[in-house]
Image (cartoon, rainbow, N blue to C red):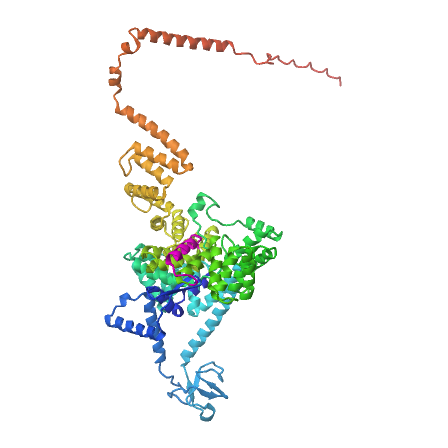
Amino acid sequence: MSLLDEEGNQDESLESKTLSAEDQVKDHSTGTRVVAGQIFLESGKSDSQSENEENFHSREEEKENSLEELNSLEMSNLLNKDLEEAEIQSPVLTAIGGTADGEPCHFPFLFMEKEYAECTADGREDGRLWCATTYDYKKDQKWGFCESEEQSNKRRQMQEAEDVYQIGMKILNESSKKAQKKVAYQYLLKAADMNHTKAMEKVSYALLFGDYLKQNIQSSKELFEKLTEEGSPKGQMALGFLYASGLGVNSSQAKALVYYTFGALGGNLIAHMILGYRYWAGIGVLQSCESALTHYRLVANHVASDISLTGGTVVQRIRLADEVENPGMASGMLEEDLIQYYQFLAEKGDVQAQVGLGQLHLHGGRGVEQNHQRAFEYFNQAANAGNSHAMAFLGKMYSEGSDVVPQSNETALQYFKKAADMGNPVGQSGLGMAYLYGRGVPVNYELALKYFQKAAEQGWVDGQLQLGSMYYNGIGVKKDYKQALKYFNLASQGGHILAFYNLAQMHATGTGVMRSCHTAVELFKNVCERGRWSERLMTAYNSYKDGDSNSAVVQYLLLAEQGYEVAQSNAAFILDQKEASIVGENETYPRALLHWNRAASQGYTVARIKLGDYHFYGFGTDVDYETAFIHYRLASEQQHSAQAMFNLGYMHEKGLGIKQDIHLAKRFYDMAAEASPDAQVPVFLALCKLGVIYSLQYIREINIREVFSHIDMDQLLGPEWDLYLMTIIALLLGTIIAYRQRQHQAIPRPAGLRPAVPQQEPPPEHQQPQ
């Protein structure tokens, strides 16, 4: 499945998940439960009581007319409910033309010994839909069309567009070759030209990012406007992004906010995420932690429900600025040669290489695509060699099931038992899950608790997570929120998404901890950033490495809108280097300054120093030494940056934005040298320069004539000091003269040198008589 398609799946409205997501937004006052490591709310009342209470609250809300208190999800539910009621009360179909023009259609009706509960095109070559107005068509011959000729043509055109769209999607999902994907997008383009909504969504995003189609922001904007008119949440969100970033349109944060809001009301998760970040950071709206919490929690609920036992894909966060400073060091990517070396070792029977490659292909990341088939093969080889880790991961694959590995609790249990008997924590955790949920064995909370404890003691995050869930719910143990918090914290240190999610729920509701909206939002934001849309970080990075900076910067800008700090800094870096031609030259520095500012507010040191540099040199703003000094000081105090300390030393030395103070300058130079070994050489040179400046300043401040006038040479050297001085000068002069004379006499003649003897010409030969 392509990345755009995966995003599309996640962007669909949340009608099927509305209740569970909304329930999770309410307080945990009535009790909770945890499923697969996720905290969900659970009411202890009967269904009828719940319905009565919901109706009561609904009536109260109508009386008070408090729509402002409804979050976006609730408003979406009301709209969906209204649509359903409208469908129920839709008018009866009336026959058009035929032998019963104007009469109501009769459903069901009998035709060719078959009953029809809706209009049909059977029996007609032109494909127009018709119905009978009495039960037995053969007997009464009473019929009419269900649609006008114009409606019929439109319906057939849309059906043709749907067929073309399905062909394109089939090619797109089944092929991994770039050439085939380009062919698929030609079908999607054709379907989009026929006004197929989903095809237009995919084509518009492909044109925006330059995915398999030539990048054309103006064309994508026109499609987004068309989609927005049709009420497409994806189109509304994308149009909001264009107005926010000023691509193809004049930048307008007010319009961006309107389109983002409509997209969120339509259930678009990326729009919710963008609004969550904007409310959290106060971008274009008043800062509101509670509003940010509402949006982020809704998206986090969806991301958490999508997390599998294997933990989902790995998010690669590569900073372009760091990679330039230290090539190949910051990216964490595996070189192709290194991967081939590991593959060679695996083929030779190296068990550790087999397990490592199996995990890489299972989760994806570090330059390796997710491939369950290859992961299964590598784990199988290592398991046959007796590796417990491989056995445990095979158990996880069978427990979860996929296109490659059929789901089988019995097979999973066998592998988990083998691994657990060898003391493997992954196997112990898997066995605990089997006993907790009764997968292949009877439910046994005591054994589940025992295996989770064993796994947690060895530091395995799944064991810690499940142990926290059992303490949270009191399953097999006495309910203990402090223990639950402890184990969730341990699992979060290992980077488990569901641990962050559970901690966020606890901080959002004040369960077991003091309620903290700020902490809850940061945790939910972390969960949201692990959604499948994070895969675009790698797509953008690959575009940049392939030399397509325009495509990369647009992708990074969208991710920056979603609140990804690494995307903000990367977008700013590309703009700073003036590598993106789609942005006007006069706009690059102001836009880069904006994104450096957003990245710095999320704690990125380089971005904070860049802000200081921009204000110091006047890039994208006026020269402002005082503001530059503030940014350098923040980077120095909060992140202990050697670069910032050195810059502060320079500004103190020159008196830029601050009163000149050589002593403070030396102090900051010394601090920079202590903070980083790389700063020692420039600090040494700066201190040498500072020493010269200090000496000159000291000399300038004192009066030399007054100093010499106060010196009494008779007292210092005696009454005949001038004779002594003349004697010393004469001796020095004599020594120099003697040394020079001896040097001239001691010059030897080079060995083998002889005076040149002129060569005598040979006598002329006697001429022979002719």
Of 24 and 757, the residue lying toward us:
24
- Is 721 displayed left or right of 477 in the figure? left
Q: What's the residue at 32%, 34% (across, down)? A: 665
Q: Is residue 116 magenta?
A: no
Please say whether residue 406 is visible from this viewpoint: no
Please say whether residue 616 is visible from this viewpoint: yes
Q: Position of residue 150 (x, y in %)?
A: 40, 78
**Position of 373 relative to 604 (above/below):** below
Q: Position of residue 769 (x, y in %)?
A: 75, 17
Q: What's the residue at 49%, 50% (across, down)? A: 333
Of 484 and 360, the residue lying toward us:
484
Q: Main secondary structure of the magenta part?
A: helix
Q: Position of residue 615 (x, y in %)?
A: 31, 44
The image quarter in which residue 141 lies: bottom left
**Position of 605 relative to 759 (above/below):** below
- Is 714 displayed left or right of 469 in the figure? left
**Position of 668 relative to 414 (above/below):** above
**Position of 457 relative to 233 (above/below):** above
Q: Position of residue 299 (x, y in %)?
A: 38, 62
Q: What's the residue at 68%, 14% (across, down)? A: 762
State which region is magenta: 475-495
- Is 232 displayed left or right of 427 in the figure? left
Quarter of the image with the C terminus is top right
Of 505 and 642, the residue lying toward us:
505
User: Total label count?
Assistant: 0
